[in-house]
Amino acid sequence: AGAPFGVARMSEKPLDRIVLRYLQKRGYTDAERALRTEAKIISVSQMALVPHLGADASIADHILYHNETDSDPESLMEGYRLLREWTHQSLDLYKPELLRVLYPMFVYCHLELVSADVPELTREFHRRFATDHTLLHHDETVALAGLATPAHLSSDPTALKFKNNRMSVRVCAYTFDLLVKYLHVANQMALLAILNGNISVSVTDGDPVPGEDETAVAARATITGTGPPSKVDVFNAKKHGRWGLLETSIEVRAMDEFDDEKLRLEKENGKDDDDNKAKAGKKGGTKKAPELESVTKEDPDADDDRDLPTIVKSEIPIPTLAHDAALDAVEDVRYRALVGPCPGKLPSCAFYTFTHAHAVLNCASASLDASLVVGGFADSVVRLWDMNKAVPGGTDKYETDPASRARRAAKDAALDAPAADRGEGGGDVEMQVADGDGDDGATIVAIGVFPNPQSQTNHPVGGVQKGSKVARPAPCVEFVGHASAVHGVSISPGNEFLLSSSRDSTVRVWSVALETCLASYKAHDYPVWDVQWCPVGHYFATASYDGTARVFAMDAPAPRRVMVGHLADVDCVAWHPNCNYIATGSADKTVRLWDVASGECVRVFVGHSGGVAALAVSPRGDAVASSGDDGSVLVWDLGTSRCVHHFVGHVGAVHSLEWAFGRGDLLASGGADETVRLWDTSASSGSDAGASAKPLRKTVGGVRGGDFSVAKRGPVQTLRTKNTPVCAVGFTGRNVLLAMGARAPKNETT
């Protein structure tokens, strides 16, 4: 037969302590000393910190000898009601900390009632007391309401999370003493059993901290599966990561190429030093060669002590980026805009509006050169738009500047000498500029998802001039193959392949040129919420409802790695720039970093009060940004495992994050509140940021048990759309900000 209702199973060591308590009460000091020596029992004053006994050593006395009336479910609900009333009537100094204990008590009382198979009483208990915790724990209270029978306790993810883990509560010593004494005096043995067996109490010295942000406190107490916050700190400190860039990365390759060009130009111009000095004497200075100006345009203020990235070695095989894609990427670095959080360096933003797609557009993305825009829809179709073909007179070739075309033609000719000898120039085809294509205005492009039935064509209407205020449809290619809604899309480097993930549990790879499906991956058994290409292609990562993230390679149908550890479905995934790590965000409110080489989790970040829906890793690879349903944006330092920035401003869920290329001091976000917001992530943001980014209030953050403070900050700029929730943001290789969303009806609020 099982143990009586509310009884904690006792081990031999707690029984030894019970005997020790008995000897102390009877005054048998010699016997007490002998037992303490034989059983190696620590002092009674330290028993509150013993994991076997949880809160207090004397709790076990009462649990062991409680009477049968304590197993009555109605007495359990009445006991919780009395505890709630006593908490609300306590002193204001200790009330906030006592209220933190109510939620764990509510959760495990609810689970005990479900286990006792009293559905009517369980529903009544939830109806009376769940509203107290809806503000801070909305998702969990809703999930608990769905538990109706004892069978649910062994199958429901929320119930398993609470049953297999202790909930953490941090209170001061006097508050804890008040709680234990009340439970003793009120003879609440069932609640004492819950406190002892299911709650991990962290007792701190001193008085309670006044004015603590209870949302942040509740977020820090999130169940991670690794134990209380102190154990999370120990876990994060065990692993030392490789947070830099690879020597073969585009950023490092571009820097080396620019340095070589600079030295070559300086050497070529060295023979004219005498002439330059003579001209300097006449004109009062020297002028830098135009070629040298283009080489140093990427960072005109740089000096010999410029901020160089950390170079690390890869632990996994890294494929070589395609030749054309690598050349384009280097040119993007050469002409990259120096954007930043300062008013004069904020980026330009291009917004793509999906018309007739509200409530059916699930995800969207754009290529690094902004030539392709792709969307995943609820009708199981993936739709791709070529922006170059949408321009009057445009082609399917990547539009770029004449200097880049000439430089690329020279490199291709050097690699293809026979073709050059035949007079066949390498590189891009010469672009033809359409008539009237000037710089006198901006083009408005509307992506029509479901065309007007009365329209006879989906192609751009001829004669539409640049600067027209009339939206022009863009040609669309539909990829059909999924059996259910599409929730994730990603374009490969070089724009050769397209990835899509669906509720039908599959991931498909499509050829952009052939407009057909090349492969279907069926490793997941549940919906796949997100999929992302590796920065160099070949590998891709998925996030699924089954609580796992998986890493695939294009040459094998089975995953190379399966990352297991989240306590709920994984909603988003992001690659580290060096391809050796992936970051995952989950509905369990945690962010985890995984080593692709070993498949192990190396970091756990706790701080969100809602599910994590978007992630982005900084260009230098030293930080990861996360956002989710709580509307906040958190930035985590990978080296120290601390939260270094806490941004607030969004009203509602934040769907997308992206860092600007370069120094990693500008972060963009898009949310359901129909805004795109820019955030200052520079190290000095806490002291000398602009007025719009001043600290709003102090809060306790990070994962260090509350010993680190970070200021909540607002955005440096807010860009508002016209009734269009933002589902995706991104930066091009030259740091133009792109944002996408589906226009909502004017009479519908988000």
Image (cartoon, rainbow, N blue to C red):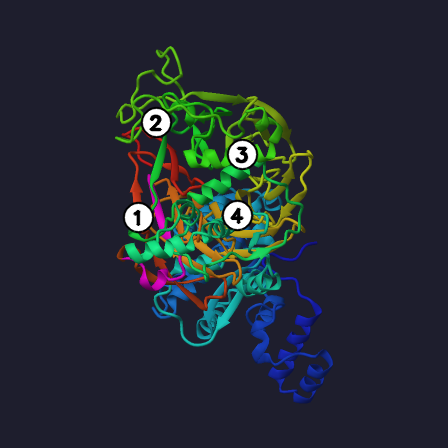
Nearer to us: label 2 or label 1: 2
**Residue 300 vertical placement versus 240 (above, below):** above
Q: CA distance from mark 1 to mark 3?
A: 31 Å
Residue 719 in the image, given as x and y percentages of width and height:
30, 42
SS state under label 2 = loop
SS state under label 4 = helix
Indicate the quadrant containing the C terminus: top left, top right, bottom left or bottom right.
top left
Q: CA distance from mark 2 to mark 3?
A: 23 Å
Q: For the residue marked with disc 3, what is the amino acid? A: Gly
Q: Which residue is mark 4?
A: 257
Q: Which residue is mark 2?
A: 445
Nearer to us: label 1 or label 4: 4
Q: For the residue marked with disc 4, what is the amino acid? A: Glu
Quarter-wise, where is residue 373 in the image? top left
Identify which residue is drawn at 58% across, 77% down. 46
Indicate the quadrant containing the N terminus: top left, top right, bottom left or bottom right.
bottom right
Nearer to us: label 4 or label 2: 4
**Mark 2 in CB contact with mark 3 (< 8 angstroms):** no
Which of the two discs, 2 and 3, labels the residue nearer the N terminus?
2
